[in-house]
Image (cartoon, grey):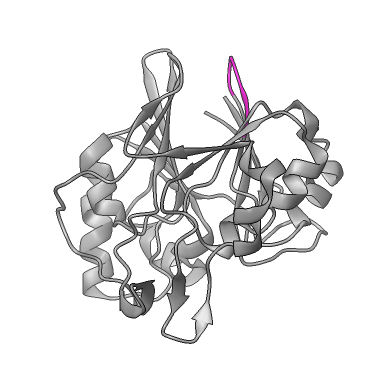
Amino acid sequence: MKITALVENTTKRDCPTEHGLSLYIETARHNILFDTGQTTLFADNAERFGVDLSSVDLCMLSHGHYDHGGGLKKFTEVNDHAKIYMNKHAFGWHYHGEERYIGLNRDWIDDEAMQERIVYVDGDLTIDEELSIYGPRPHKKIDMGAAGLTMKVGGKFLPEDFRHEHYLLIWEGDKTVLISGCSHQGILNIMEWFHPDVCIGGFHFMKEEPGERLRSYGKVLAGYQTTYYTCHCTGVEQFAFLQPIIPQMHYLAEGDVIEV
């Protein structure tokens, strides 16, 4: 399996970046676009990195935030056939606080051409022998909180419960690879739910001060026989703090290509 980071907050290459995430994943049976960043940058970088987006046969949106799904319209312009899998709650009213809307472009709800491409996932979905999509599980090891994010339900702002998040699990022989966009449900919970051999994605530690609590999280993650490739909302400072605690953890920057 080969994974190219089309968009990530940082890069070692001479190319533009943005706060967002987009991964191009090549498996034995599929070419997958996982998230689209917040703009058309993912498509620009695909061309820059030699990735043919017209070859994508499956697109998945990890959750309904602008920095993961902002490029969806552009994707439908460069690829005319791949289905787009997203959680049934992805087009909810997602906010930072009560003023800043951070959800998807709601004009797309009335875009018939786009809606024909979307598969709304309710819970879990097995796509084939290689791919499955999973929603959050009912039990949690730790409540990571909403980090100031809210959802508007019935005209009222409530703490976000991230019901719009889901995860892609890929089987590669007897190995499992879990792809998570932001791990808003809590990476410790997600690891307890799935126990993957490889875990790739953001861990949402960027607002967590390096200290004893973050160290305790790191010790839990280090206890799994899992190789981690983390990025985006994990935070560069937090990664530097955690890496000595979790020696099997690596950073995935924009333009990086990994094989797992």
Q: Toward which corner of the image does residue 135 lie, by quadrant?
A: top left
| Between 245 and 196, the one nearer to me in the picture | 196
Circle count: 0
Q: Is residue 19 visible to the viewer in this orientation of the structure?
A: yes
Please provide percent x and percent y for residue 153: 34, 71
Q: Specify whether 256 is left or right of 101.
A: right
Residue appearing at x 48%, y 67% in the figure: 235
Q: Is residue 9 visible to the viewer in this orientation of the structure?
A: no
Vertical comparison of 175 with 208: above or below:
above
Q: Residue furthest bottom?
A: 99
Vertical comparison of 30 with 77: above or below:
above
Q: Is residue 165 magenta?
A: no
Q: Specify whether 239 is left or right of 4.
A: left
Quadrant housing the N terminus: top right
Q: Specify whether 139 is left or right of 21.
A: left
Please provide percent x and percent y for residue 258: 60, 35
Residue appearing at x 38%, y 29% in the figure: 125
| Between 220 and 137, the one nearer to me in the picture | 137
Please provide percent x and percent y for residue 94: 45, 69
Vertical comparison of 40 with 83: above or below:
below
Magenta residues, as a range?
Answer: 27-32
Q: Toward which corner of the image does residue 170 lie, by quadrant?
A: top left
